[in-house]
Image (cartoon, rainbow, N blue to C red):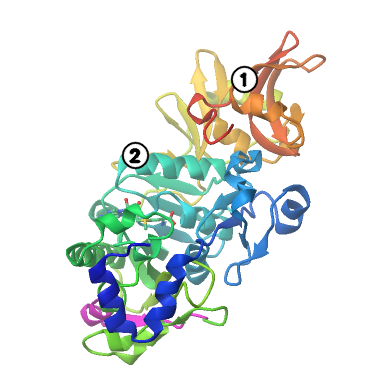
């Protein structure tokens, strides 16, 4: 691999003899990982059903290495949201933030959603996760991944961090800043990243990272935890960012990170002050474990944090849910309760802990239930993916061992003789894949047009 010359020179200056082992990894295959979605299944079930070779990632209980020929992205279980394909060292970060059910959590730089989907699973779909991404096209991908994984406790915002900071001062229990970076850990995965790399780009990223962290600081409550991470090796974007952040805010303290599963200490000697506390940060190196590489710092805020009074989001009236309730009575076995909100004709169920989101650019507000049409309700794909098969009245079962699922994911009509008329959830080996509507011996296909054929033969 033709690494940028200035990059190799810099790494040799920093690492000395160790640089040899580090550069050797660029001749190896990159590490491939998937993380099981604990909201839908577990390792035992997936191992029994899926034809993949799964080997435990040591620093993430739900994480597994797979082999190139497995191609889990092409398996229908991917569309059913049973796992997220994620670079293994990236899985370390949400383990360090370790959010708990019921908390208020912010993922400030969230697209495409690897870490957000992991955080939501760790929160067991409760509390409130705000997953933010400033670029609209990337926010859309993030939103689709939140939907695929059946996540209902998450609001996807499409905002600049400064606007969110005005809205949510002192609000969050935990914040993740998985910052845009120079991506030195991405060179094996995405060789394009090497073309963007330059010492100037590293400096630009460092400048942006410091700004983003400032906004995150203002949104963290007193006693709250902030995790900062990058997928790059440069000290300017890692230890030096944390060094400056600690100097600016004396109420921040670096917390220790468990390194027993292969992470190593941050490098205070790569900073100006050589603050020994920086050794509490963690580096995951590709020559020390199987993965591409990450940096992670965990901080606690001790000082006071001014807050803004938030108004809780209020549900629309039960009377206005009539068409939805009619649909629900026919299609679901359970009655949903929560904060129902209409955005235009689209009906959502907000996360229970959600404030009203007036004034924010929101790409997804909790569970998208469907659309209120004239005197009828049409369910959204998100609803099929958010509930287990047992929650639906009518099920059209497909098996991954047959090829029928390809026809469904391609958008074709399926035969449905002797099926009860109406909304039906299509499952793959017992896991919901999407909607169909049975009538006259056929199942009309409601798999979203935008998702059809994507990544499939
Ligand atoms: C390293 S990626 C995040 C990866 C994501 N956390 C995941 O695990 O899938 C950084 C993200 O930050 C976004 N970003 C860029 N500039 C930003 C800014 N000023 N504030 C917040 N996010 C920004 C990028 O568009 C990108 O999606």
- Say which residue label 2 marks: 137
The reply to whether the magenta stretch includes residue 431 is no
Name the residue located 76 percent from the left edge and 31 percent from the top edge.
402
Compared to 95, does 422 lie above or below? above
Residue identifier under label 1? 445
Residue at 63%, 62% in the rendered image: 62
Disc 1 + disc 2, Cβ < 8 Å: no
Q: Secondary structure at mark 1?
A: strand
The quadrant in which residue 102 appears is: bottom right
Asked if residue 129 lies left or right of residue 272, the reply is: right
Instruction: State which image quarter holds ligand 1.
Output: bottom left
Location of residue 197 (image quadrant): bottom left
Q: Position of residue 30 (x, y in %)?
A: 50, 61
Q: Quadrant of the C terminus?
A: top right
Question: Which residue is found at the position 59% from the left and 53% from the top?
Answer: 68
Residue 36: image x %, image y %? Answer: 63, 55
Q: Secondary structure at mark 2?
A: helix
> Looking at the image, which is closer to me, 425 or 267?
267
State the extent of the magenta-drawn residues as a range.
243-258
In the depicted view, which residue is nearer to us: 132 or 450?
A: 450
Coordinates of residue 335 in the picture (x, y in percent) = 67, 35
């Amino acid at each position: 691999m033709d690494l940028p010359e200035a990059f190799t020179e810099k790494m040799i200056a920093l690492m000395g003899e160790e640089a040899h082992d580090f550069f050797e990894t660029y001749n190896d295959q990159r590490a491939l990982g998937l993380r099981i979605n604990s909201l839908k299944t577990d390792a035992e079930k997936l191992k029994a059903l899926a034809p993949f070779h799964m080997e435990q990632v040591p620093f993430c209980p739900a994480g597994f290495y797979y082999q190139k020929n497995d191609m889990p992205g092409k398996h229908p279980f991917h569309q059913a949201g049973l796992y997220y394909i994620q670079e293994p060292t990236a899985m370390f970060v949400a383990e360090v933030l370790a959010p708990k059910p019921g908390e208020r959590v912010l993922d400030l730089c969230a697209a495409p959603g690897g870490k957000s989907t992991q955080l939501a699973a760790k929160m067991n779909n409760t509390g409130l996760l705000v997953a933010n991404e400033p670029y609209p096209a990337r926010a859309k991908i993030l939103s689709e991944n939140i939907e695929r994984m059946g996540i209902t406790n998450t609001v996807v915002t499409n905002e600049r961090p400064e606007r969110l900071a005005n809205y949510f001062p002192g609000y969050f229990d935990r914040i993740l800043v998985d910052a845009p970076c120079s991506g030195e850990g991405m060179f094996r995965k995405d060789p394009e990243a090497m073309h963007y790399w330059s010492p100037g780009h590293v400096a630009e990223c460092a400048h942006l990272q410091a700004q983003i962290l400032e906004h995150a600081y203002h949104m963290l409550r007193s006693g709250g935890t902030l995790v900062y991470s990058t997928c790059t090796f440069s000290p300017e974007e890692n230890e030096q960012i944390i060094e400056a952040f600690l100097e600016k805010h004396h109420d921040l303290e670096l917390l220790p990170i468990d390194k027993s599963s292969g992470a190593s200490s941050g490098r205070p000697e790569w900073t100006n002050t050589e603050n020994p506390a920086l050794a509490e940060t963690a580096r995951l190196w590709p020559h020390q474990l199987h993965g591409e590489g990450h940096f992670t710092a965990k901080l606690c805020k001790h000082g006071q944090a001014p807050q803004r009074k938030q108004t809780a989001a209020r549900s629309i009236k039960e009377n206005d849910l009539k068409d939805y309730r009619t649909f629900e009575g026919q299609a679901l076995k359970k009655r949903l309760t929560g904060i129902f909100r209409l955005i235009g004709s689209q009906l959502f169920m907000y996360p229970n802990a959600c404030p009203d989101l007036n004034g924010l650019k929101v790409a997804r507000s909790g569970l998208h239930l469907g659309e209120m049409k004239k005197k009828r309700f049409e369910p959204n794909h998100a609803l099929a993916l958010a509930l287990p098969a047992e929650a639906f009245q009518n099920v059209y079962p497909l098996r991954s061992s047959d090829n029928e699922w390809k026809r469904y994911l391609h958008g074709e009509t399926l035969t449905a003789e002797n099926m009860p008329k109406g909304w039906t959830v299509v499952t793959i080996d017992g896991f919901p894949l999407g909607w169909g509507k049975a009538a006259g011996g056929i199942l009309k296909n409601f798999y979203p047009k935008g998702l059809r054929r994507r990544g499939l033969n």
